[in-house]
C-alpha cells in the first residue's frame, strides 16, 4: 500500500498544501487522490482551479517546477471526474480499485484523447491543450 494512505483525506490534503508531504510519497496515485479529494470537496470546476494552484505551489517548494504540466494536470482531473461519475465507491481506496486503469494504464488512457505527446510538449506544460482525438466527457 502506498504511503499516502497513512493519512486521512483531510490530513493528506493538509500536509500536501503545507508542502510537508515527502516528494517521494507524491506518486501518480497520490496525484489521483488529490484530484478525487478536491472534486468531492469542491466540485469539478473549483477543483480544476484549486489543484493547479496547489500543485504549482508544491512543485515550486520542492524544486520541481519544471515537472508541472498544465495539460496533464487538467486531463488527469477530468479523467478522475469521468470515472467518479460512474463509481459506486465512497472513498479513494475503493475508487482506485474499482478503476485500476487510472493507476496502471494512465498513459494509454491519455493516448485515447491525445494524438501528440502531452508529456514533453512545452506548450502543454504552459497551457491546457484540448484533446485532438476524443474530447473529455462527463
Image (cartoon, grey):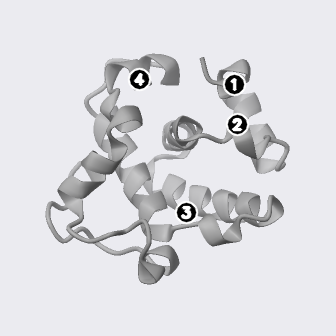
Q: CA distance from mark 1 to mark 2?
A: 6 Å
Can you tell which mark lies on residue 15?
Answer: none
**Which residue is the site of mark 2?**
25
Q: CA distance from mark 1 to mark 4?
A: 17 Å
Q: Is residue 99 above or below residue 13?
A: above
The answer to whether marks 3 and 4 mark residues whose Cβ atoms lie closer than 8 Å is no
Please provide percent x and percent y for residue 31: 56, 44
First along the sequence among labels 2 and 4: 2
**Which residue is the site of mark 1?**
3
Of marks 1 and 3, the one in the foreground: 1
Q: 10 Å neighbourhood of mark 3: few (<14), some, or many (≥20)?
A: few
**Which residue is the site of mark 3?**
49
Of marks 2 and 4, the one in the foreground: 2
Mark yes or no: residue 30 visible.
yes
**Residue 87's quadrant in the figure?**
top left
Left/right of residue 15 with respect to residue 113 in the rendered view: right
Of the pair 39 and 56, the residue shown nearer to us: 56
Q: CA distance from mark 3 to mark 2?
A: 23 Å
Of the pair 70 and 83, the residue shown nearer to us: 70
Of marks 3 and 2, the one in the foreground: 2
Please provide percent x and percent y for residue 24: 72, 41
**Which residue is the site of mark 4?**
95
Secondary structure category for the residue under label 3: helix
Of marks 3 and 4, the one in the foreground: 4
Please provide percent x and percent y for residue 21: 79, 41
Q: CA distance from mark 2 to mark 4?
A: 19 Å
Left/right of residue 27 with respect to residue 88 in the rendered view: right
The answer to whether marks 1 and 2 mark residues whose Cβ atoms lie closer than 8 Å is yes
Amino acid at each position: 500500500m502506498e504511503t499516502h494512505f497513512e493519512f486521512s483525506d483531510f490530513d493528506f490534503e493538509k500536509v500536501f498544501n503545507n508542502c510537508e508531504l515527502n516528494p517521494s510519497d507524491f506518486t501518480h496515485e497520490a496525484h489521483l487522490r488529490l484530484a478525487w479529494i478536491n472534486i468531492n470537496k469542491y466540485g469539478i470546476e473549483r477543483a480544476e482551479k484549486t489543484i493547479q494552484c496547489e500543485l504549482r505551489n508544491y512543485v515550486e517548494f520542492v524544486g520541481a517546477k519544471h515537472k508541472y504540466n498544465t495539460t496533464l494536470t487538467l486531463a488527469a482531473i477530468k479523467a478522475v471526474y469521468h470515472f467518479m461519475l460512474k463509481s459506486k465507491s465512497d472513498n479513494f481506496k475503493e475508487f482506485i480499485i474499482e478503476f485500476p486503469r487510472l493507476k496502471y494504464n494512465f498513459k494509454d488512457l491519455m493516448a485515447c484523447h491525445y494524438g501528440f505527446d502531452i508529456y514533453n510538449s512545452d506548450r502543454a506544460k504552459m497551457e491546457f491543450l484540448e484533446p485532438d482525438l476524443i474530447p473529455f466527457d462527463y
